[in-house]
Amino acid sequence: MPEATAVHVPHAPDPARLDHLAEEVLKAHGTAALARSPLGDAENVTYRVDTAAGPRLLRLKPPGRLTRSHVASELNWLQALRRDTTLRVPKPIPFPNGELVRHFAVPGAPGLWLGTVLEWVDGEFRPDRLTESDTLQVGRLAASLHAHAETYRLPAGFTRPRLQDDPAFQSWAPLLASRPDLTGPERAAINAALRVAEGALAAASQGAVRTHLLHGDLHQGNYLFAEAAAGAIDFDDCLFGPALYDLAATLAHLSLPDQDGSLAAAFLAGYEDVRPLRSRERELLGAFVTLRHLWMLHWILQRDRQPAFAQWAPEYRAWQLGALMQAALTPRGFY
């Protein structure tokens, strides 16, 4: 069980070394860049790479959280989604020898980084102006991903994390001990949410919720729109778990722009157009939204003292704590 301080924040020793690494990966991949634009470095370091054949996404994963096998498995699923469905998801582009992911060293830095290249998914993000029609499409997208996952025959060696093994549901004692800045009511809300999460995961383990491969992080920054269809990007958090966790990830983030609940209602209607929820799954949905807020709080509390997160972490943390305190006052959570 990891200690509260054992979190990896992916910063290379300096930007020049990152640039060198990006060039090395593109050279090994055989991709000639016309232009390269940095996108972010919250968990991975990513670039948009413009090429004669179209734009690409270059993703550099630091050592620590996931292994080469984990990343290869994520890309295997993306390949299968592109082969078996018409869903708009990234297409992995192999290295010349057929590998989907390779190890790379950063001079002067410990460990090996993982380099991957994917086709760019065009579309528009609408985080602050979502409509019911938009979230209806996102619901259909989520259900279609789940429908594929239920029948996807895992290739040999396929490995991804399991939700029930996540430290967010196991390692709160050392984290709480390290955070004297949490108030008594906040700690009470966290402990209440832990009890809800334990019950939700126990019910899922007993078959109350369909369990399979999930996207894991389907929020407004990871779905986008082109014409009338929604597409999904960033499968970096894909994992095995109860299907309700994916719905909860979307619903938790919708809570900010969704003042009257209409966006959430449309999302669930779109999901059920493709894959109706079972009665027990409906009953447990609120518990899984609480579980997702608990996960997000754990995530930020392990990072909010790091420079890369410091600017926006206080607002994010307050949002999660407020949601958990609200959930503690509502017997069935949010829904």
Image: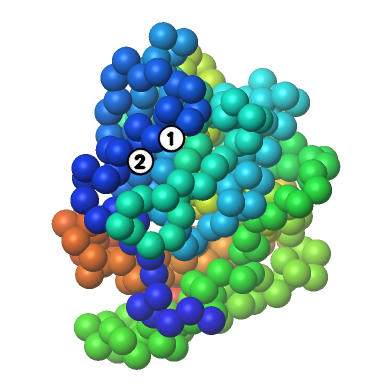
Identify the image quadrant of residue 96.
top right
Q: Which residue is at 32% across, 80% downward?
A: 186
In front of the other: 55 or 104: 104
Regarding residue 47, the answer to whether it shows in the image is yes
Count of labels in the image: 2
**Residue that extends furthest to the top in the rendered view of this protein:** 52
Q: Amino acid at mark 2?
A: Leu
Kindly state the secondary structure of the residue where label 1 is placed.
helix
Regarding residue 188, the answer to whether it shows in the image is no
Kindly state the secondary structure of the residue where label 2 is placed.
helix
Which quarter of the rendered picture does the C terminus lie within? bottom right
The image position of residue 214, as x and y in percent, is: 64, 48
Residue at which label 1 appears = 25
Q: Can you say whether 45 is above or below 89 in the image?
A: below
In front of the other: 296 or 166: 166
Q: Is residue 275 left or right of residue 316?
A: right
Between the C-alphas of marks 1 and 2, the distance is 6 Å
Circle 1 Cα neighbour tier, 10 Å, few/some/many (<14 / 14–19 / ≥20)? many
Q: Amino acid at mark 1?
A: Val
Q: Cβ–Cβ below 8 Å for labels 1 and 2?
A: yes
Identify the image quadrant of residue 94.
top right
Q: Which residue is at 79% across, 44% downward?
A: 155
The image position of residue 208, as x and y in percent, is: 77, 63
Q: Is residue 42 left or right of residue 79?
A: left
Q: Which residue is at 29% across, 19% downward?
A: 35
The image position of residue 129, as x and y in percent, is: 32, 31
Residue 162 disc label? none
Residue 21 disc label? 2
In front of the other: 97 or 101: 97
Q: Is residue 209 left or right of residue 294?
A: right
